[in-house]
Amino acid sequence: MFSLLKEDIQVVFDRDPAARSTLETLLCCPGLHAILMHRLNHWLWGKKMYLLARLGSHITRFLTGIEIHPGATIGRRFFIDHGMGIVIGETAEIGDDCSLYHGVTLGGTTWNKGKRHPTLKNGVIIGAGAKVLGPITLGSGCRVGSNAVVVKEVPDNATVVGIPGQIVTRSKDNGESREAQREAMARKIGFSAYGGSKDMPDPIQNALQSILDHMQVMEEELEVLRRQSKK
């Protein structure tokens, strides 16, 4: 338990440049508070003390603005940045080294019992305001752009943006480290957890605009060839 606590504190220093001291992190980081409380609530849930677990989850939501159902399974080194408005459903499964920004929803699309929430593999990053809905799986190393709505399976190391979510790039295993692949992806498409890139809102529209621009260039070149042919 102590090793988990140490990891949860260290990951804040690793991923949040605003973190200054261990004491400040323990006292003033709502994401860390929500994770620590969830670990207790999840333990209670596993012991079938459902009422206590739900009550603990309710108190955590009141204090932090982060709602994590005690039935959700969360791996190690999970990081929540800011966190206000995050909702994680009962059957959600989150792997190791994942990061969520504020306003993220891991929600269901049915009222039926059973598996109805997403599964996140290791190293997934989900940007602010994004919604991942249904019993789908996001592969290891995925990135979900700000305000995206994802309702379909996503393969490993893919980046998804837009509404509905579209895969805009996918890294390949060419000997680079996973971290290097992620950084290359971010530079290539301007990934931003806060949606700062112009490419985030509508990747399909951007693609169509690129096609239209290319057609315009081809038309101009064709016109030049016609003139030269007449001469």
Image (cartoon, rainbow, N blue to C red):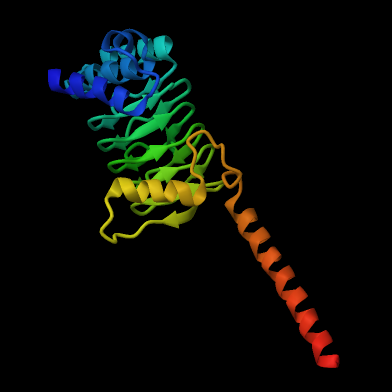
- Give the camera-side residue of 169 and 93: 169
Dividing the picture into quadrants, the one containing residue 94 is top left
Vertical order, 184 against 113 (above or below): below
Vertical order, 215 against 98 (above or below): below
Q: In x, y percent, where is residue 84? A: 47, 20
- In the rendered image, the quadrant that contains the C terminus is bottom right
Number of marks drawn: 0
Residue drawn at (43%, 22%) of the image: 83
- In the rendered image, the quadrant that contains the N terminus is top left
Residue found at the very far right of the displayed protein: 231
Task: Tell whether 48 sits left or right of 205.
Answer: left
Q: In x, y percent, where is residue 173? A: 29, 59
Q: In x, y percent, where is residue 11? A: 28, 26
Residue drawn at (65%, 54%) of the image: 205
Residue drawn at (21%, 24%) of the image: 7
Residue 89 visible? The answer is: yes
Dividing the picture into quadrants, the one containing residue 196 is top right
Q: In x, y percent, where is residue 45? A: 23, 21
Residue 109 visible? The answer is: no
Task: Tell whether 141 sits left or right of 111.
Answer: left
Vertical order, 147 against 80 (above or below): below
